[in-house]
Image: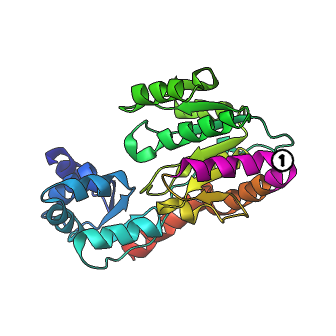
Amino acid sequence: MRETRKIVAEEKIDLVHAHWLLPAGVAARAALATSRVPLLLSVHGTDVRVLKGLPFGSLLARWVLKRVRLILPVSSYLRDRVSGLVGRGIPSIVLPMPASDMFLTSARKKLTRRIIGIGNLARQKRFDVLVRSLGILARGKIDLDLTLVGDGPERARLEGLAKEEGIARKVEFLGRKPHHELAGILLEAGVMVLPSVEEGFGVVLVEAQLAGLAVIGADSGGQREIIQPGETGILVPPDDPHALAQAIKELYNNGRKTLLMAKRGQQAAKERFLAAPAALRLLNIYKRILG
């Protein structure tokens, strides 16, 4: 914090934009305690969830936000969660996380029988629901493969669950991968599933859409702001492996319809979430704050 304060003073910084309420928001708030430099704060989801679980999380959030000129939540859902955390409305502009055009490919002509899930293997992501849904489909003689990209505290339990469901040979755990490798990995899949709850946004869904995949998300959190049900993807009830299995089955039973939906999803992602227009929006916000 001392170093940040020094940089702001010596470099004559006009504006500070911090990402995450905790720890960057706390650090920026402390560093700018005696400065008049405007502070902007992007919140992403995990930070709000962590603060909500702390004994003095609401007080800490109020202390940070008292100094923030404008908050930039990645979804309307997250904006409302922050307001609930601090007990009041806050000046905000929803600015979704942008996706890189490195994921952009031509529209798919074939639906591969591989499903992919990407994210931290933690309870909140609900990848156990996805594994159970594949088990349900396997018992119904629907043969699909699953790739999980990521690592975390739930990995061992998920590996055990795959064995219990009799699909261990059909589930591939790739571990964590560098972001630049994900575009190539997505090309091997036909459907992306994000079953998580309380997701701040869900940029992996956007990246999958850009790569031409059909997408399924839990009807929870920021995923509702990415997927238009039946048009650009499918939303399913959270924590319901049978509903998820049925949605996956429908996608593969109607290949042509699924590819058309994936194409619409790709076009929507290009129009709404690519990095270049998002950067222009952010630049205009900076200009507005600085007058």
What segment carries the magenta color? 240-260
Tell me which corner region of the image, top left, top right, bottom left or bottom right, holds residue 111. top right
In which image quadrant can residue 88 be found?
bottom left
Q: Residue 12: image x %, image y %?
A: 27, 57
Asked if residue 215 shows in the view, the reply is yes
Residue closer to the observer: 234 or 129: 129
Color style of the picture:
rainbow
In which quadrant will I find the C terminus? Answer: bottom left
Percent position of residue 253, x then y: 81, 47
- How many numbered tags mark residues here? 1
Mark yes or no: residue 177 visible. no
Check if residue 150 falls in the magenta segment.
no
Residue 182: quarter of image: top right
The spot of residue 23 in percent (x, y) is 24, 49
Q: Is residue 108 above or below residue 180?
A: below
Residue 257 horizontal side relative to residue 47, left or right: right
Residue 252 in magenta? yes
The residue at 73%/64% (across/down) is 231
87 over 47 or under it: above or below: below
User: Does residue 243 sit above or below 170 in this rendering?
Assistant: below
Instruction: Tell me the chief SS of the magenta region.
Output: helix
Which residue is located at x 14 percent, y 65 percent?
A: 59
- Asked which secondary structure carries label 1, the reply is helix
Amino acid type, label 1 = Gly
Residue at image x 18%, y 49%?
6
Q: Find residue 263 and report its horizontal and vertical position in percent.
A: 79, 54
Q: Around disc 1, counting alpha carbons within 10 Å, would you say few (fewer than 14), some (14 to 19), or many (20 or more)?
A: some
Q: Residue furthest front?
A: 139
The furthest residue to the top: 169
Q: Which residue is mark 1?
A: 255
Viewer-proximal residue among 146 and 285:
146
